[in-house]
Amino acid sequence: MRKGCRLFYATDFQSLMYPCFTFCRILGIFPYRINNSTFEASKLCYILSTIVFCVFCICGIITIYQLDVSGTIHPLTVPRSLERHSFFVLSTFVVIVTYVLRGPRLLLLQTVLEISSKLPLESYKKLSKLIHVKDIFGFLFLVGMGLICCIMMPLNLILSTIYLTYTGMLLFQMDMLYINCVCVLKICFKKINNNLVKVQELVINDKPHLLRRTYHEQKNPFLLMKLKALKKQHLMVSDTVQMLNTIFSLQLVATIVLSFAEITFNLYFYIVLIMSKEKQELWNWVFIMCIVYYTIKIVLIVWACDSGKDQAAKIGITVHDLLNSTNDKQIKDELELFSMQILHRENVFAAKGLTIDAMLLTAMVGSITTYLLILIQFLVTSHSCDKKAISIYEIA
C-alpha cells in the first residue's frame, strides 16, 4: 500500500484514504489491516484501540471531576460552563459510538472498496487533491491549536487540554472519513450516469435502424446487458448509501449539534471580549479560529452530501430521457424496472431522519445570524444603560 501511495495523486481507494487511515491509526481508532486489497480485523490493533478507549474514559472522568467536583477548572461564566459541558458530553458520545461500531465500519470500508474498484484513475486523481489537502492540513491545524492551548493553560490543566485536543482530532478524523466515503459514492453515481449517457447516445445514433433484424440480433442484447449491469451497480451503491447513513447517523447528529453550539458560543465569547475592551489578542484569535474551523467542517459535510444527492438524482433524469429516446419494447421494459428501482431507493445522505443538504446549512446560518443580532442589540443596550447610570451618578 505504501509503495503505491503518492500524496495528491491517488490511483485507488486505498491510496485515496491513506492520509485519513494513517491519522486514524495514530489516534488508535483504526483497528484494521489491509491485506491484498481487503480490510481485515487486527487483534493487536483491537487491543490498542481498547487501551486508548480506556485511557480516554479515565481522562474524561478526571476532567469532569476537576470541572464539577474539585473546582480545579473554574468556569468564569455560565455560558463558558455550558460550552464546556456540551463539548464533553457530545464528544464523549461520539467516541463511544466510534468504539462500538468498529465491526460495521469495517464492513462499510470493504464495501466501498469493492464498488469503487472499477472507477477510472482520473477520478481518483481529481478527488485526491481535495481529500488529501483537507485531511493533512486539517490535522496539522488541530495539532497547532492544541500546542497553543497547552502553552496558554496552567500546568494543572495540561491533562484536560491534551484530552480536549485528542478528542477534537478524533472527531475531525471521523468526520473526514464520512466525507471521503460520501465523495467516493458520489463518483460512483457519476460513473453510472455517464455510462447511461453513452447508452443514450448509442440508441439515438441507431434510431433509424431500430426495425432492422441486425439491430435486434447484435445491438439489442448488448444494450440490455449494459442496462442490467448499470442497474446492478446502482443497487449496490444505493445499499452502500443506506449502510453509510446507518453507521454514521449518531455521529453526524452529534457533530451537527456540536458545531452549531461551538460556533454560537465562540461568537458570544468573541463579541463579549470585544465589548469589554480587554487586550487579549491571543484569545481573540483562538475564538476566531474555532469559529472558522467548525464553519468549514460543517460546510464540507453539507457540500459533500448535497452534491452526492444531486448526482444520484441525475441518474433518474437520464433514465427517463433514455426511456423517451427508444422505441424498443425490451429496452423500455428494462428502463422501467430501472426507474422503479430509483424511485424505491431515495439516495439522500441523512442522519436519523435529518437530511444533510443546503437547507440544513441555510437553517443553521439563519439561526446563528438571528442569535448574533439579538446578542449585539442586548450588549449595546446594556452598555448604554451602564453609561447612563455612570452619568447620573457623577451628576449626583
Image (cartoon, grey):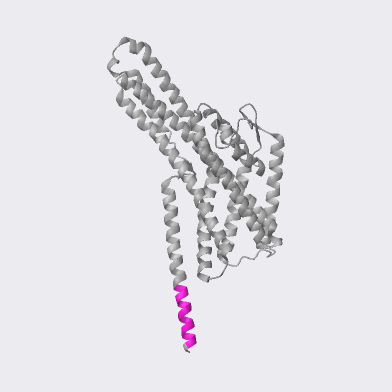
Whether residue 109 is visible: no
Q: Nearer the viewer, residue 222 or 103?
A: 222
How far from the left and from the top, in percent, is residue 168?
A: 60, 50
Quadrant hosting residue 156: bottom right
| Badge count | 0
Residue segment shown in magenta = 381-394
Based on the picture, tell me whether residue 41 belongs to the magenta stretch. no
How far from the left and from the top, in percent, is residue 388?
A: 45, 80
- 14 vs 307, left or right, is right
- 274 vs 332, left or right, is right
Whether residue 114 is visible: yes
Give the answer, above or below, for where 369 lies relative to 182.
below
Instruction: Residue at 69% x, 53% y: name it.
Output: 59
Quarter of the picture holding the N terminus: top right
Q: Considering the whole magenta stretch, tell me its main secondary structure.
A: helix
Give the answer, above or below, for where 271 lies relative to 57.
below
Give the answer, above or below, for where 102 lies relative to 35.
below
Instruction: Residue at 68% x, 46% y: name it.
Output: 53
- 343 vs 54, left or right, is left
How far from the left and from the top, in percent, is residue 382?
A: 47, 73
Residue occupying the far bottom of the picture:
396
Q: Which of 285 and 265 is in front in this view?
A: 285
Q: Which of 194 and 49 is in front in this view?
A: 194
Based on the picture, tell me whether residue 391 belongs to the magenta stretch. yes
Quadrant hosting residue 219: top left
Instruction: Residue at 34% x, 12% y: name it.
Output: 216
Give the answer, above or below, for where 155 lies relative to 385.
above
How far from the left and from the top, in percent, is residue 241?
A: 49, 35
